[in-house]
Amino acid sequence: MQFKNVDEILNKYGKYVVQQSKSNLTKDKDDFGGNKGGGALYNSISYKLDKSQDDFLLDFLMEDYGAFVDKGVKGKTSTYPETSAALSKFQYGSGTGQKGGLTKALYNPETKSGWIKEKKFQWKDKKTGRFLSYESMSYLIARSIYNKGLKANLFFTKPFEAGLKRLPDDLIKGFALDIEDPIILGTKK
């Protein structure tokens, strides 16, 4: 049996969640006044609808670190109590992540690439007036993030849950239409 109405509803839900998640990223300002949209995370957000004869599977895809941006990460010494980061299952210093991974994501001296170089900003040393190296900056930023954690912004969770509230009713209507059409029109499976 064809479930074109159910397909349409699930695709509509997937598009809604992806579009709203991307929109939320562009509205979310980082500590330097820029937004988090337009980067690798923004470009990676998508969905995939897999269907077999008996079931449907709607997968939402994004960069691995998207979960940390969405849910936040508790810091080693403190966290952001005003957001859901305090409730996050992720925490720096838990021993489960790759050692030095955050520093290398900010700037990897072996490949001479990373977030800091991509964003093209450097701080100046107050004493000498010279720019700090990318390695020094990556260490300082990583240490701060490690201790304070990351604020949760729920860029994905909010649209996912908002769309999920309407989804069961829409699916029931779509499924009913898919069942009724073959009966009324007298078509075969």
Image (cartoon, rainbow, N blue to C red):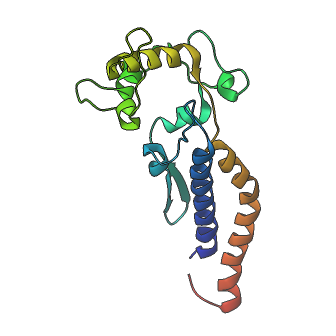
- Above or below residue 185? Residue 91 is above
x and y percentages locating residue 120 in the rendered image: 38, 34
Looking at the image, residue 180 sits to the left or right of residue 37; the answer is right
Residue shown at 58% from the left, 16% from the top = 148
Q: Give the quarter of the figure containing the N terminus.
A: bottom right
**Front residue of 5 and 122:** 122
- Above or below residue 69? Residue 164 is below
Q: Give the quarter of the figure containing the C terminus.
A: bottom right
Looking at the image, residue 75 sits to the left or right of residue 116; the answer is right
**Front residue of 103 and 34:** 34
Residue shown at 40% from the left, 19% from the top = 137
Q: Looking at the image, which residue sits at the far bottom? A: 185
The number of callouts visible is 0
Residue 140 seen in the figure:
yes
- Above or below residue 102? Residue 171 is below
x and y percentages locating residue 42 in the rendered image: 49, 48
Q: Looking at the image, which residue sits at the far left? A: 110
Residue shown at 66% from the left, 76% from the top = 178
Asked where in the image residue 128 lies, by quadrant, the reply is: top left
Residue shown at 41% from the left, 8% from the top = 127
x and y percentages locating residue 168 in the rendered image: 73, 58
- Above or below residue 118? Residue 52 is below
**Front residue of 107 and 20:** 107
x and y percentages locating residue 76 in the rendered image: 56, 11
Asked where in the image residue 95 lies, by quadrant, the reply is: top left
Residue 74 seen in the figure:
no
**Front residue of 65 and 166:** 65
